[in-house]
Image (cartoon, rainbow, N blue to C red):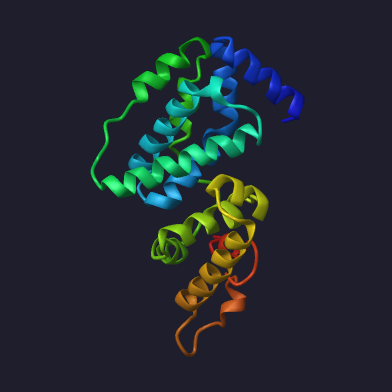
Amino acid sequence: MSTERERALLKDARAGSQEALGELYRLHSRRVYNLTLRMTGDPAEAADLAQEAFIKAFGAIESFRGDSGFGTWLHRIAVNTVRDHFRKRRPQPTEEASLERMLEAADVTRTSRASRDPVEDRLSDEVTAALAALPEDFRLTVVLCDLLDYSYAEAADILEIAEGTVKSRLFRARALLARSLAPPAGEAPLRQRGNPGHPGAVREAGKE
């Protein structure tokens, strides 16, 4: 989507346009859900957290200054929502009904349901388990850079850390993944199955 189109949607959303909110939701719901699913490993929990992130973002949309892209700002909210969830470690009430009320005029209920479908990266069970075993900060970096294709600079903006820290975490996370996914003696070498030591390798290792 062009920058001009996004600005127009944000302007309309700030003015109370439900159609603009619906379009922003359609554009970003899949990636936000992918993020929450890869962090939690539970589709229902991930759907609730994605809904919560959108509710927070739409409720604070008038405070969005445009210093970064809307998607970056939205993913920062999603990351913080996931982190808050991990800190609390207890189920949170679902606010899906509130989100659906906000989007009622845009008729995006079916899109909301679709965001619960399996994610498109199609990771294998082996790679999913290895990813889940990573420390939270490492997992976030891998999800943002290797699964959602954010650049180092964009990931640093989302996580509110230095770009060098993103690179360092990603390097260490890929090394841990490579060690975890190394085959037992006698099986195919890791490079034939996708090497998590290189960009995009999490996706490659998870291809079906």
Task: Name the residue at the left extreme.
Answer: 90
Q: Residue at x 41, y 21 (%)?
A: 99
Q: Residue 10: where, in percent of width, then height?
A: 63, 20
Q: Vertically, is 49 above or below 86?
A: above
Q: Quadrant of residue 55?
A: top left
x 38%, y 52%: residue: 41
**Residue at 43%, 42% in the rendered image:** 80
Q: Position of residue 32 (x, y in %)?
A: 51, 39
Placement of the C terminus among the 4 image quadrants: bottom right
Q: On the picture, is 103 further left or further right than 2?
A: left
Q: Is residue 127 left or right of residue 10?
A: left
Instruction: Note whether residue 34 is visible.
Output: yes
User: In this orientation, which residue lies closer to the viewer: 79 or 100?
Assistant: 79
Does residue 10 appear to the left or right of 77 in the view shown? right
Residue 67 is situated, as x and y percent measured from the top left of the image, at: 66, 34
Residue 155 location (% of width, % of height): 60, 50
Left or right, residue 168 beside residue 46 = right
